[in-house]
């Protein structure tokens, strides 16, 4: 079963704080589960990229392709980063993302550390609006045969910070 909840944030405020608060709320609503995927559009991904460039390497664990570690690591240190798996026909396309990473001038970050010390995988979905993101729990044994999506009640929140 896939769990999903949509959140909104003010695009002029700190994206990472909004994500952290939303992760906590998602967990409280679906305990003991934690969100393990974050979907947002290219505009929101750019804000996440900017945060990761500023935060790296001070306390933020960035998930990249292991096979490209040396190449990606150097790019990250130069502040060249792009976030998110590619979404093709509604599904995460790891191979396409890997090929883009091999030839890109930017490092491809496909996730970062979540509140439960696991990874929150990033997925680029340009069908979403600039001020929204979706947190999802997708079980590891995703076999597409019995994949019912459960949408949380529409109690979407906008996080604004002074």
Image: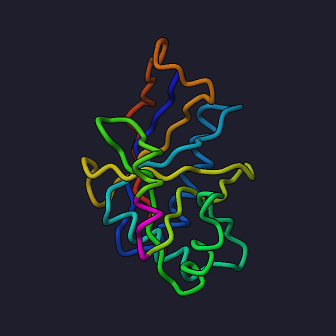
| Secondary structure mostly taken by the magenta-highlighted segment of the chain | helix
Furthest-bottom residue in view?
A: 78
Q: Is residue 4 magenta?
A: no
Which region is colored magenta? 100-105
Quarter of the image where one finds residue 53: bottom right
Q: How is the image coloured?
A: rainbow
> Looking at the picture, does residue 49 appear above or below residue 4?
below
> In the displayed structure, does residue 48 sit left or right of residue 141?
left
Snapshot quadrant of residue 69: bottom right
Residue farthest to the top?
146
Q: Nearer the viewer, residue 15 or 142?
A: 142
Compared to residue 145, the image places residue 60 above or below, namely: below
Q: Quadrant of residue 31?
A: top right
Label count reads 0
138 left or right of 11 in image = right
Q: In x, y percent, where is residue 157?
A: 42, 50
Point out residue 57 in the picture as x, y percentages from the top left corner: 68, 79
State the residue in front, 139 or 24. Answer: 139
Instruction: Name the residue: 38% across, 50% down.
Output: 86
Q: Name the residue: 38% across, 36% down.
A: 91
Give the residue at x 31% y 66%: 43
**How far across and how far down the image is residue 148, in percent?**
45, 17
Residue at x 45%, y 38% (from the top left corner): 5
In the rendered image, the vertical position of residue 39 relative to residue 68, given as above or below: above
Residue 13, image x, y percentages: 42, 73
């Amino acid at each position: 079963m896939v769990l999903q909840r949509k959140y909104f944030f003010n695009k002029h405020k700190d994206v990472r704080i909004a994500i952290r608060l939303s992760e906590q709320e998602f967990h409280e609503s679906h305990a003991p589960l934690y969100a393990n995927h974050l979907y947002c559009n290219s505009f929101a991904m750019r804000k996440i990229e900017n945060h990761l460039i500023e935060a790296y390497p001070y306390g933020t664990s960035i998930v990249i392709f292991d096979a490209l570690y040396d190449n990606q690591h150097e790019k990250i240190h130069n502040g060249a980063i792009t976030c998110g798996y590619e979404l093709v026909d509604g599904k995460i396309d790891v191979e396409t993302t890997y090929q883009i990473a091999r030839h890109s001038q930017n490092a491809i970050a496909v996730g970062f550390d979540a509140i439960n010390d696991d990874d929150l995988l990033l997925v680029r979905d340009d069908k979403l609006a600039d001020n929204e993101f979706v947190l999802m729990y997708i079980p590891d044994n995703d076999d597409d045969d019995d994949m019912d999506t459960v949408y949380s009640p529409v109690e979407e929140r906008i996080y604004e910070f002074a």
